[in-house]
Image (cartoon, helix red, strand yellow):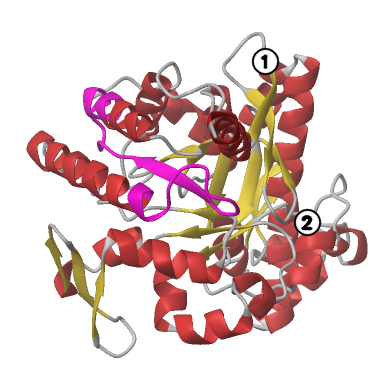
Amino acid sequence: MRKDRNILCIFAEYMSMKFTLQHKDPSSHARAGELHTDHDVIRTPIFMPVGTAATVKGIFHRDVRDEARAQIILANTYHLYLRPGTEILERAGGVHRFSTWEGPMLTDSGGFQVFSLAACRKLKEEGCHFRSHIDGSKHMFTPEKVISIQRNLNSDIMMPLDVCLGYGATYEEAEKAVKRTTEWAQRCRDAYPAGSAGNLLFGIVQGCTFPELREASARQLMNIGFEGYAIGGLAVGEPKNLMMKNLRVLNPVLPQDKPRYLMGVGTPLDILHGIEAGVDMFDCVLPTRNARNGTLYTSEGKINIKRLQYAEDDSPLDPKCGCYTCRTFSKAYLRHLYVSQELLAFRLNSLHNLTYFLDMVRGARKAILEGSYAEFKAEYEAKYPEEDALFDAPEL
């Protein structure tokens, strides 16, 4: 009987060992690794396109997978819970089958969305009462409920319900939010015990811009134990140097053998500085949102395609990019589509921006494995000098 119990313990430990750290850059904290999920292996560092409603806005899954070569996308528990509803998703067999996305998928708990509804939500110990932004109907999220919803979605990576505050919160407010986030994280872990087969559950480090609270939050979550650790509540308006200060505090604290995920970040330099600080995973709506606004990222820097200067420009958007947009169309045609408000503009622009971001993190991974990350990052810093200066600005 004891032998059988030991075998079960070893099996449970094996099931929880999902992340392999392959190499660390010698001149920074940048890491290259592999995260194993039921739907595929994710090679980090990685950028995850945001597919809030189980679709990356304005672009086919086929192009996200085959052109941009995304390894994993996000969906959002709050939005899918409200529409189409968990019963429909459960009947369909989960979010992968419902959407036909065959790769790994991460679902946010919906905590950020709920807490952004400050005017129509009420926070209590048991959970959060809120009104739908769609029809005003009343709902409640508890830690246990968001785990149940995500289990029905059958996402590869699940997030616990947490308390996310905006920039400018007081120390007392942040301390209270960390306490409740930890309590809810424990309830989420209890609802989905460590070693369970299938889905991975990450803890979310909070603490606003107070490094001591960030460290305390991380240690409390590590005591509970998760398959990975997310860093929430940054890129919400704070200066970039302050964001980096809090990331650097967490690097020696968080386990080296677990993936780190910086939520909702960000620009190319946000991502590259985050990688340098030891972060493995990133997501942001910026590439597709900016694409729909005509802002495109290229090997020569950021451009606004709607400017008149591109009206007769027959050159490709980015001669160094191999995406369908760049190998097929001229800047002049892309500008024509955009100023004509043709839907194809949103699709082609989004495809390019996603390809740019994903090519960048693939290049970062290659540089880490080759020990040349500093040189790789410097090339991108030279493209965005004004933004790069913000990372080194003195603290106010």
Whether residue 84 is visible to the viewer of this picture, yes or no, is no
Give 161 or 262, whichever is nearer the viewer.
Answer: 161
Which residue shows up at 79% across the image and 61% down it? 65
Q: Secondary structure at mark 1?
A: loop
Quarter of the figure with residue 94 = bottom right
Q: Secondary structure at mark 2?
A: loop
Give 89 or 336, whichever is nearer the viewer.
Answer: 89
Which residue shows up at 40% across the image and 61% down it? 147
What range of the chain is rendered magenta?
A: 189-216
Task: Residue under label 1, please give it.
Answer: 25
- Relative to 223, residue 143 above or below: below
Tell whether position 34 is magenta.
Answer: no
Single out the residue that lies furthest toward the bottom: 135
- Relative to 163, residue 342 above or below: below
Q: Position of 233 compared to 304: left or right?
A: left
Q: Position of 240 compared to 174: left or right?
A: right
Tell whether position 208 is magenta.
Answer: yes
Task: Residue under label 2, please give it.
Answer: 68
User: Who comes first in sequence, dot 1 or dot 2?
Assistant: 1
Q: Position of residue 373 (x, y in %)?
A: 70, 20
Which residue shows up at 74% across the image and 70% down it? 61
Q: Which mark is residue 152?
A: none
